[in-house]
Image (tube, rainbow, N blue to C red):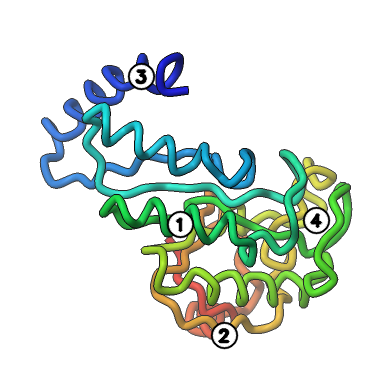
Amino acid sequence: MEENIWGPSAPLLKAAISGVLSVYPNAKILLHIAGVGYSRGDIAAYSFFQSMVKLGVPFDIAGLSYPYMFSGGDVPQPYFAQADFQSALDSIAAMGRPIQIVEFNYPAAPAGITKVPSPSYPFTPTGQANFVQDFANAVNGRIESLWYWYADYYLGWPDAANNPSSLAADYSVPTIRLALPWLYLNSRRLQRRRQPGATPASRKQQTEIQGR
């Protein structure tokens, strides 16, 4: 990978980073690989960042994607409890960069999902809430921030069969008692879809998730 892909990409990354910093000198550079859960022992994830350091690509934050339940290969569930995942986080953290998990979600309904969930986290609003809570607790203290991907998705969206991944579809998810300032909603349309009658304060209390 380093010889055939990452090595040839390094000059492009350096040039892009140099361009960004020439305009925004205080910018923080995050390098991202969607490599967790897709290689034995998660070697692809930490090897990527090892290579970037070796090749002299400057970056401040290591970004990862968590395996989705509706795409990619099968991984043991819940994956956040697996030794490979925890070891990958530790190996990356040892390089001296904070970690952000910039994509993760979990279905609140089984529509279109072919993977089998852990018995502890069925594809229901409650199962989803418990997953988010336990996942956040599992990585608390090991990562800098956690981003929920496609939080505003709801069943009935045109691609409903592919992504039943919103926070319980219509904001009916039971309260997720996280109170963690580093858990964010990574969403493009959240401002368009508010629960009728809900105030900003009530929405924050309901999910206790800080919006982007």
**Which amino acid type is marked by label 2?**
Arg
Residue under label 3, please give it: 7
Q: For the residues marked 3 and 2, what is the alpha-carbon distance in whole angstroms?
A: 43 Å
> In the structure shown, which secondary structural element does the residue marked by tag 2 occupy?
loop
**Which amino acid type is marked by label 3?**
Gly
Q: Residue at x 42, y 59 (%)?
A: 90
Question: Considering only order in the chain, which callout, 1 or 4, is on the residue closer to the N terminus?
Answer: 1
Q: Residue at x 26, y 54 (%)?
A: 96
* Front of the two marks 1 and 2: 1
Label 3 CA crowd tier, 10 Å (few <14, some 14–19, many 20+): some
Q: For the residues marked 4 and 3, what is the alpha-carbon distance in whole angstroms?
A: 42 Å
Residue under label 4, please give it: 155
Question: Considering only order in the chain, which callout, 2 or 3, is on the residue closer to the N terminus?
Answer: 3
Q: Is residue 92 above or below residue 209?
A: above
What percent of the width, then of the height, locates residue 73?
Answer: 74, 40
CB under 8 Å between discs 4 and 3: no
Question: Considering only order in the chain, which callout, 3 or 1, is on the residue closer to the N terminus?
Answer: 3
Question: Considering only order in the chain, which callout, 4 or 2, is on the residue closer to the N terminus?
Answer: 4
